[in-house]
Image (spheres, helix red, strand yellow):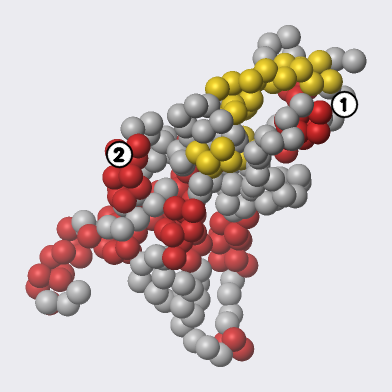
Amino acid sequence: MAEALLKVYRGDEKTGKLVDYKIPVEAGMVVLDAVHYIQGYYSPDLAVRWNCKAAKCGSCSAEVNGKPSLMCKTRLDDFDLSQPIEVRPIKTFPLIKDLVTDVSWNYEVNKTIAPFKPKTENTDEWKVYQEDVDRVQEFRKCIECFLCQDVCHVLRNHDKKDLVNKKDLFAGPRFMVRLAGLEMHPMDVANRIPYIKNEAGVGYCNITKCCTEVCPEEIHITDNAIIPLKERVVDEYYDPILKMWRAITGKS
């Protein structure tokens, strides 16, 4: 039977280190299976967050050979098993223990976003074109694995003091996806453009598309969410014709 050598991060931020484990490899195994084998046969105290094992809950995020990935979706037969496989926690958020990080900051950001505000309470009047449904449906696929947050250049900073400052300035790609889903909904009337510009800090994104590359749901985060939001901010705040119109009419 083939074997794989997993080097798994154990400990906290101060005392953590990579620990070697040899794992028997069977057909169809994924990295999460290997981690469960470690828990069952070597280290039952290995901390790991997981739930569905079907790539739909977003719980088992980690960095496998340096790439932010869902462990349940990362097959062992995609690797050269003659080389060790490193499994580390995602780095953008504070480490609790082993492979578990504290992602609670994301939920605090989520609370600051204005919820859906319909233009009418009478749902009988909701007539929506299919293309409008298709446009926002993509954003509903997000499973909140926070891999896009982990790989984001603005948030991913190893200086903890600076990291806090960056988090105060930029909400991250996951919440650009949520904001896009709300802003592009044909029945929503809330104005979130000032929030997107100021609190969410959409201007900090340098559109490298790294968030899109790691999204397990294949959401086109940069092209379909972030860039359209940037365009709306530009239209609202920097359109010279609109600025002239406001100066002449005194209307906002």
- Residue marked by disc 1: 27
- Could you give the CA–CA distance between mark 2 and mark 1, rounded to whole angstroms? 44 Å
Left-right relation of 110 to 170: right
Residue at x 31%, y 58% (from the top left corner):
199
Q: Is residue 223 visible?
A: no
- Residue marked by disc 2: 161
Task: Please state which of residues 145 and 233 is positioned toward the viewer in this rendering.
Answer: 145
Question: Does 41 sit above or below residue 239?
Answer: above
Residue 6 at what x, y percent from top left? 69, 20
Quadrant in the rendering for residue 18:
top right
Amino acid type, residue under disc 2 in the picture: Lys
Question: Does 43 sit above or below residue 59?
Answer: above
Residue 211 at what x, y percent from top left? 50, 40
Q: Earlier in the sequence, mark 2 or mark 1?
A: 1
Residue 134 at what x, y percent from top left? 61, 61
Q: For mark 1, does the 10 Å Cα neighbourhood hold few (<14), some (14 to 19), or many (20 or more) residues?
A: few
Question: Does 237 sit above or below residue 126?
Answer: above
Residue 149 at what x, y percent from top left? 47, 43
Amino acid type, residue under disc 1 in the picture: Ala
Task: Please state which of residues 180 and 17 is positioned toward the viewer in this rendering.
Answer: 17
Mark 2 or 1: in front is: 2
The residue most toward the right is 1
Residue at x 20%, y 74% (from the top left corner):
252
Q: Which mark is residue 115?
A: none
Q: For mark 2, does the 10 Å Cα neighbourhood hold few (<14), some (14 to 19), or many (20 or more) residues?
A: few
The residue most toward the left is 248
Q: Is residue 136 visible?
A: yes
